[in-house]
Image (cartoon, rainbow, N blue to C red):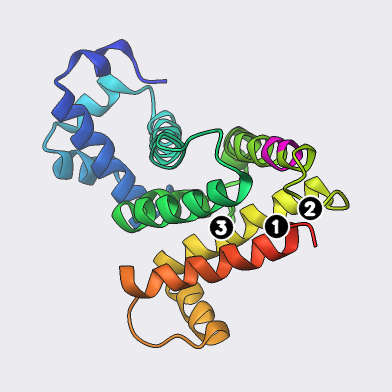
């Protein structure tokens, strides 16, 4: 957690530091990120960073958690919990794509936790990141199974894993050159990803999920 001094500085200064830190960690990776360079980008003295955070690791963990919270607010904050599973999944994909396109650095930070040399951060962050979504999706599928909206022979755990795995791969395809090429090859897509081209992709993904979950 940040020191109390971090919360006493003006909000725009806090936001600038967090934004620049997220961008630099995503661009350079944790190990190659230099605090002096970050301070220059954020327009503060290098020593000020250590007035706000105990260490580079402390800053990195806070930036990752901050990005996770921003993502959840963007996706779940405008979602009616009474919507059925199909409408909620469509909303999650649409709002997730908007967030990732506006803030690709947070998806990159998420992906980087699985990289070589990042196991200590995986141990600190992965369960915290994954448990929320896993529990949410499993509750949602079970609820709508009881309502008769989901097939009663669906394995809830595998279904939740499948939905989130498709989500992660799709979002990665919006920011990673490798996964973008992969998506284009499998789905035979030409040109850049725009709102016009993303809409039918999301529709195709959610239709596929719906077909697997809906009763015959």
* Number of marks present in the image shown: 3
Q: Is residue 194 visible?
A: no
Helix, strand or loop at disc 1? helix
> 10 Å neighbourhood of mark 2: few (<14), some, or many (≥20)?
few
Q: Are marks 1 and 3 in contact (CB under 8 Å)?
A: no
Mark 2–mark 3 Cα distance, whole angstroms, equals 14 Å
Answer above or below: position of 70 versus 163: above
Mark 2–mark 1 Cα distance, whole angstroms, equals 6 Å
Q: Position of residue 37 (x, y in %)?
A: 21, 46
Answer above or below: position of 65 versus 119: above
| Quadrant location of the C terminus in the rendered image | bottom right
Which residue is tagged 2? 158
Which residue is tagged 3? 167
Which residue is tagged 1? 162
Mark 1–mark 3 Cα distance, whole angstroms, equals 9 Å
**Residue sitting at x 45%, y 85%:** 189
Q: In the rendered image, which quarter is residue 196 located in?
A: bottom left
Q: Which mark is residue 85?
A: none
Would residue 142 be counted in the magenta stretch?
yes
Would residue 107 be counted in the magenta stretch?
no
Q: Which region shows up in magenta? A: 139-143
Of residues 198 and 119, the one nearer the viewer is 198
Of residues 21 and 192, the one nearer the viewer is 192
Helix, strand or loop at disc 2? helix
Q: In the rendered image, which quarter is residue 27 located in?
A: bottom left
Q: Position of residue 48 (x, y in %)?
A: 20, 25
Helix, strand or loop at disc 3? helix
């Amino acid at each position: 957690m940040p020191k109390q001094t971090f919360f006493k500085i003006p909000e725009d200064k806090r936001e600038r530091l967090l934004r620049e830190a997220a961008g630099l960690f995503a661009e350079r990776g944790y190990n190659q990120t230099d605090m002096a360079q970050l301070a220059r980008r954020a327009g503060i003295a290098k020593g000020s960073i250590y007035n706000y955070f105990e260490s580079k690791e402390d800053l990195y963990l806070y930036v990752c958690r901050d990005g996770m919270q921003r993502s959840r607010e963007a996706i779940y904050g405008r979602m009616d919990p009474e919507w059925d599973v199909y409408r909620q999944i469509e909303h999650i994909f649409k709002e997730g794509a908007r967030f990732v396109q506006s803030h690709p650095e947070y998806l990159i930070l998420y992906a980087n936790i699985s990289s070589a040399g990042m196991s200590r951060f995986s141990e600190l962050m992965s369960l915290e990141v994954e448990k929320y979504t896993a529990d949410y999706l499993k509750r949602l599928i079970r609820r709508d199974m009881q309502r008769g909206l989901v097939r009663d022979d669906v394995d809830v755990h595998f279904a939740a894993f499948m939905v989130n795995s498709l989500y992660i791969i799709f979002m990665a395809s919006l920011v990673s050159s490798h996964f973008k090429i992969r998506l284009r090859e499998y789905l035979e897509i030409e040109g850049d990803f725009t709102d016009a081209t993303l809409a039918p992709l999301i529709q195709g993904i959610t239709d596929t999920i719906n077909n697997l979950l809906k009763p015959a």
